[in-house]
Amino acid sequence: MLYGQIWNLLKREHMPLVHVGTSNIVGAGSGVFSRQSIDTIPTVMCLYPGIYTPGMPPYATQYLANQVPPSFYTSQRGKEGPNMHENAYIMNLQSCGGYIDGWTIKSQYDGEKLDANHSACGHLINHHARDHNTSVYSFCWNDVLEHNTQTKSARRGGDESHFQLPNEMLSDGSPWYYDEIEGEITCFPTIDETPPPTNQLCGAALVLTSPVSKGDELLLDYCLQEPLPNWAKDWYTT
């Protein structure tokens, strides 16, 4: 388990293992680089920030698997039109279900902010299908918090000694899925309603899959499937 390493990246006094600079990939913009040589595998390098949209509840997916045609329909929240490129910041969580939209809250990483968690920059790691050296580790934040022995307030993050969690649950009142059994659309709560249970909030960390030297750029295989989305056709390689 990597819960201890993940928790350490929320401590305000921690020394980030990464820094953001100009990517070595032409035209890629910013990239994430290792601050030191590391040969311990796996090592949690940084966190992936953003708004979390959970997957459909288990009873719905189990029912869905046995129905033709399906009786449950999830909303598709990908951006369209001129903002389609923002989909590049969506990270699917294979083990937890759902996804994190790193564009929505770009991150707690912001070079202009004094109170910034510089380890919450995983959304800036670029793609490389051959030379990738990181992978995605998804988890439930409640498991990370319960794994540690700090006080309840500290474990929730955002106190004097810890940064806030870099993820939030989607809470905008939009449709989540249509339940044909109940004949109704289930929506996310809004900020004026009771927020979703925190034990449903998931996050993602980027972990090393091979040793790196100081100054090496961290790279991730995005694992996009054909047909490629329009925003990736000009640069994505397999």
Image (cartoon, helix red, strand yellow):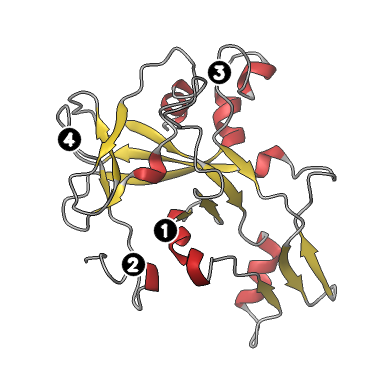
Indicate which disc, 2 or 1, sits on the residue closer to the N terminus: 1
The Cα–Cα distance between marks 2 and 1, rounded to whole angstroms, is: 8 Å
Q: Amino acid at mark 4?
A: Asp
Q: Quadrant of the N terminus?
A: top left
> At 28% across and 43% down in the image, what residue appears?
134
Q: Which mark is residue 216?
A: 4
Tag 2 residue: 232
Q: On the picture, is 185 further left or further right than 110?
A: right
Q: Are marks 2 and 1 in contact (CB under 8 Å)?
A: yes
> At 41% across and 16% down in the image, what residue appears?
14
70 or 33, nearer to the observer: 33
Crowd rating for badge 2 (residues with CA inside 10 Å; few <14, some 14–19, many 20+): some
* Residue 31 pos. (x, y %): 28, 42
The Cα–Cα distance between marks 4 and 1, rounded to whole angstroms, is: 23 Å
Q: Name the secondary structure under disc 4.
A: loop
| Residue 229 appearing in the image | no
Indicate which disc, 3 or 4, sits on the residue closer to the N terminus: 3
Q: Amino acid at mark 2?
A: Ala
| Residue 104 appearing in the image | yes
The Cα–Cα distance between marks 3 and 4, rounded to whole angstroms, is: 28 Å
Q: Which mark is residue 88?
A: 1
